[in-house]
Image (cartoon, rainbow, N blue to C red):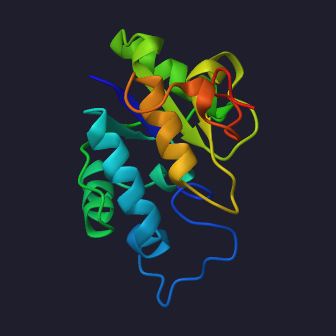
């Protein structure tokens, strides 16, 4: 089953987004981006692992509730370890501990560098978040939807222009 490593800021919210209230993670997730992500992850029959800084100091069940309250029904199964290294190293550590094949993962983030995970990286623009192009790129990584070579503007996706 595909595992999708998920960042929040720049993925589920865009630069300049300011919620009416700020009582938890759910308030910082834009509904249209949440819907787009949830649909794409469920299309690939994927599971989520939170790699965002939002994972720090929060219990997994609380994070699950926050994502569900924001409209994300795809299962959140875990968080990456906090290693104080590059995010891609935390993701690889999670995969190594679970003997998870890198061919069965995707990383969704707005950071520039995912090191050796570049071929499994769907980079979002912090101005756009998880938009239709990012959703298409995620599906393409797992053989759903258009071929990845036809998805323009998503750095990190094989064949993206």
The total of numbered circles placed on residues is 0
Residue 99 position within the rendered picture, expressed as x and y whole percent measured from the top left = 36, 9
Of 78 and 116, which appears nearest the observer?
A: 116
Q: Left or right: 31 with respect to 129? A: left
The quadrant the N terminus occupies is top left
Residue 9 is at least partly visible in this image: yes
Q: In which quarter of the image is residue 17?
A: bottom right
Of 34 and 62, which appears nearest the observer?
A: 34
The quadrant the C terminus occupies is top right
Q: Is residue 93 above or below residue 53?
A: above
Q: Left or right: 8 with respect to 45? A: right
- Identify which residue is drawn at 63% across, 66% down: 14
Residue 12 position within the rendered picture, expressed as x and y whole percent measured from the top left = 51, 60
- Identify which residue is drawn at 43% across, 18% down: 95
Residue 59 position within the rendered picture, expressed as x and y whole percent measured from the top left = 32, 52
Q: Left or right: 111 with respect to 19? A: right
Q: Left or right: 124 with respect to 20? A: right
- Identify which residue is drawn at 53% across, 19% down: 92
Residue 6 is at least partly visible in this image: no
Q: In this view, does 63 lie above or below 42?
A: below
Of 79 and 28, which appears nearest the observer?
A: 28
- Identify which residue is drawn at 67% across, 15% down: 116
Residue 158 position within the rendered picture, expressed as x and y whole percent measured from the top left = 64, 20
Q: Quadrant of residue 145?
A: top left
- Given the current orientation, which residue lies at the most extreme bottom position? 20
């Amino acid at each position: 089953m595909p595992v999708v490593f998920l960042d929040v800021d720049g993925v589920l919210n865009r630069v300049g987004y300011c919620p009416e209230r700020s009582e938890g993670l759910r308030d910082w997730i834009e509904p249209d981006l949440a819907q787009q992500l949830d649909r794409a992850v469920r299309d690939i029959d994927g599971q989520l692992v939170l790699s965002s800084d939002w994972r720090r100091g929060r219990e997994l069940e609380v994070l699950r509730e926050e994502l569900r309250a924001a409209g994300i029904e795809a299962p959140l199964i875990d968080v990456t370890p906090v290693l104080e290294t590059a995010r891609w190293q935390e993701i690889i550590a999670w995969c190594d501990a679970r003997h998870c094949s890198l061919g069965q993962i995707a990383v969704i983030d707005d950071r520039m560098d995912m090191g050796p995970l570049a071929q499994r990286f769907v980079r979002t623009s912090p101005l756009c978040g998880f938009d239709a192009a990012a959703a298409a790129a995620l599906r393409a990584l797992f053989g759903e939807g258009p071929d990845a070579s036809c998805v323009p503007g998503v750095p990190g996706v094989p064949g993206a222009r």
